[in-house]
Image (tube, rainbow, N blue to C red):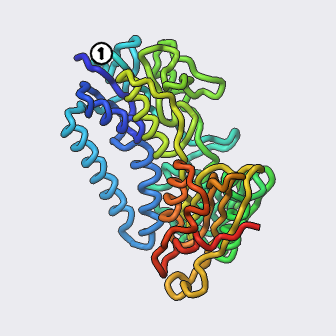
Amino acid sequence: MRYDAIIIGAGPAGLSCAKYLAAHKKKVLIVDKDPLGGTCLNYGCMPTKFRLKFSGDPEFLYKQRRMVDSLNLAIEKSLVKRGIDVVYGRACLSDQHTVLIDGQRFEGEYIVLAVGSRPRSIPGISVDNNRVFFAEQLLWQLPENINKMQIIGAGAIGIEFAFMYSSVAKKIIVCDVADEILPREDRDIASRLRVFMRKAGVEFRLGGPCTVDSDADLVLIAIGREADREALDELLNGVQVVCGDTGFIQTDEFLRTSVSNIFAIGECIGRAFYANTASFEGRVAAQNILGQMQPLSYPAVPRVVFSSPPVASVGVASDDLFYGMVNYPHGEMFYIYPLSGRLKIGVDKNDRIRFASMIGPNAQELIPLFTLAIEKSVSYEELRQMLYVHPTLAEAVARVRFE
């Protein structure tokens, strides 16, 4: 059977690309060996946030499974409704226009690789899914009688799992070679979260080598993502798509690989590791397949750590910015939000907002305001002059003071 495009991988990147192409009357096939939704839905974003909210429910694993299964089904129905064919199976290339799915041949004018990545491993540490886990497997476990849990990696995944298991493990230790948690985030905000976590009983071992403690009942390896080189070799099957030194697929600015009709998107290209950027790349690839030739240029990318309190940020901190901070909620708000927070904004010499980071109640709901401000080159004075509803957390935006 012949298609305009065959998309291998049904995570956020592949789904976005498929839907965009189908909306422009292209005949599309999407294939995945796993349930639809990719790592985000099946092993990452969705079950993580579900568990953070409902882990106290004795039936949460059953409800988590039901939630994921219902979303898998909803995605499949939405694809079928759009006229997109869905095939489950293990795919590999036969040539630059042919895909074999469990032995069955499918031809496509274009092929899009959206096959994701895998958890990054630590040499010498064996992940046995009994005592030592990656997050993807641990999300679907219910370990009991945990005296000590060790988390290697103090990024977003490690921090969220520390909160997830704080009511289960008697002792949690978070380790990282970096000297501060959330090393990609603003240090002022990250250190404030670490204070909250220490008060909750979480211990830290930062700024040195990380090895597995022999007395840890449960160990989580959460040090990021890497290319799944073995899976990529099996998928490419000799087709000369060039991968870089780190194993990720190389693309040009239009997301084309070294083979002109084969595109690659999502985590398998190693540029960004967020569901929202994957979806964005999927749309850009689809536009370029349609001949619109849009170079990849990321918009402002918001980031959230669903800790307690949550941390949210957007933009990049740099030495050429001027910074202002304010604590929130302000005095009259404590009756609604008893937990204090902090907002930090960076502006350039023209007062244009280029960076924002915050920790506190509903930070994830406030960050879109700054995402839009950065994307549209809004000045801080324009934000300050807005009328905010009183009493709300958003009022803190108008109270920032620059030294």
Q: Is residue 59 visible?
A: yes
Above or below, comparing residue 314 to residue 101 in the picture = below
Q: Is residue 161 visible?
A: no
Q: Residue at x 56, y 70 (%)?
A: 308
Q: Quadrant of residue 179?
A: bottom right
The one nearer the camera, 281 or 220, is 281
Q: Residue at x 30, y 47 (%)?
A: 72
Residue under numbered circle 1: 107
Q: Quadrant of the C terminus?
A: bottom right
The one nearer the camera, 139 or 387, is 387
The x, y position of residue 178, in whole percent, is 76, 52
The one nearer the camera, 214 or 26, is 26
Q: Residue at x 44, y 73 (%)?
A: 56
Q: Residue at x 68, y 62 (%)?
A: 190
Above or below, comparing residue 6 to residue 354 in the picture = above
Q: Quadrant of the N terminus?
A: top left
The x, y position of residue 245, in whole percent, is 66, 24
Q: Quadrant of residue 167?
A: bottom right
The x, y position of residue 121, in whole percent, is 63, 41
The amino acid at mark 1 is Glu
Task: Please rate how many residues cluster around mark 1, counting C-alpha atoms within 10 Å: few if below 14, some from 14 to 19, many from 20.
Answer: many
**Left or right of 293: which side holds 224?**
right
The x, y position of residue 80, in whole percent, is 20, 37
Secondary structure, mark 1, is: strand
